[in-house]
């Protein structure tokens, strides 16, 4: 695999390789993902039947979401380009007694290999880390079966998100490591909606994810000014 042939930013990949051993440390650099994972799973479970579903977690990292989906009864595959993350995911799933198919492969290559295969595709906290997010949306659409469900989550691009998601979360509150996000790579909801329309995905819902630093609580709903989730479905008429 080379960065020239796949939708990959080597610098972004290096960030996650550097913290691969910390994926399952609840108080480590990925603490925020641990904190919001129950909300992510509930959001998906309320909109798609997980029990018995064939699910793909794109950008699975160390397997936080993949394992949670498997525990809800889904047959889960997870893909990521970070070798360290995949190794951690495989080891943790084995220790937990979970049968999850983890592979080090990019979404576009898997879409050529297994088009229209999955009932549910998740692509969470990944669009803002790749050079061509529109191409990633297209790959996710191709991986879903006609009528299948695709979920995205990312960060809006505006002054408010810069203050809260980058200055606040990275520099002031240290919720995530500094340099995790680059403002220019953040994704406006209108951009995501446009990519979805071009790939036979119908945008069903956009939902904001919020954090109160005083109570240390997260919740979902309301505006999409900063962090947000997208619930989409692939067209049946293909």
Image (cartoon, helix red, strand yellow):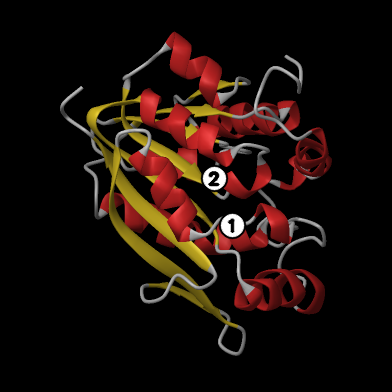
Up/down of 225 relative to 139, above or below: below
SS class, disc 1: helix
Could you say where residue 59 lies in the image, as x and y percent from the top left? 57, 36
Q: Is residue 107 visible?
A: yes
State how many labels appear. Answer: 2
In the image, 198: left or right of 11?
Answer: left
Image location of residue 179, percent across then percent down? 81, 58
Residue pointed to by mark 1 = 33
Q: Name the residue at 57% across, 40% down.
A: 133
Q: What's the CA distance linking mark 2 and mark 1?
A: 8 Å
Residue 178 rendering spot, x and y as whole percentages: 82, 62
The answer to whether 24 appears left or right of 47 in the picture is right
Residue pushed farthest left?
237
Marks 2 & 1, CB-CB < 8 Å contact: yes
Q: Residues within 10 Å of mark 1 (few under 14, many from 20)?
A: some
Point out which mark residue 11 bears: none
């Amino acid at each position: 695999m080379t960065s020239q042939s796949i939708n990959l930013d080597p610098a972004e990949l290096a960030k996650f390789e550097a913290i691969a051993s910390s994926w399952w440390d609840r108080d480590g650099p990925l603490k925020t993902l641990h904190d919001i994972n129950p909300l992510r799973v509930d959001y998906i479970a309320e909109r798609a039947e997980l029990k018995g579903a064939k699910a793909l977690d794109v950008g699975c990292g160390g397997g936080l979401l993949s394992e949670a989906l498997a525990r809800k009864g889904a047959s889960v595959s997870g893909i990521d380009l970070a070798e360290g993350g995949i190794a951690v995911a495989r080891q943790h799933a084995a220790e937990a007694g979970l049968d999850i198919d983890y592979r080090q492969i990019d979404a576009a290559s898997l879409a050529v290999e297994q088009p229209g295969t999955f009932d549910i595709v998740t692509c969470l906290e990944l669009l803002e880390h790749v050079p061509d997010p529109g191409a990633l949306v297209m790959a996710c659409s191709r991986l879903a079966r006609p009528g299948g469900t695709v979920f995205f989550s990312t960060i809006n691009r505006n002054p408010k998100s810069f203050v809260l998601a980058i200055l606040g979360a990275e520099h002031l509150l240290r919720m995530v490591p500094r340099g995790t996000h680059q403002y220019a790579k953040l994704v406006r909801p209108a951009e995501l909606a446009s990519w979805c329309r071009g790939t036979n995905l119908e945008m069903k819902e956009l939902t904001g994810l919020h954090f109160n630093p005083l109570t240390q609580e997260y919740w979902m709903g309301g505006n999409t000014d900063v962090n947000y989730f997208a619930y989409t479905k692939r067209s049946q008429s293909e």
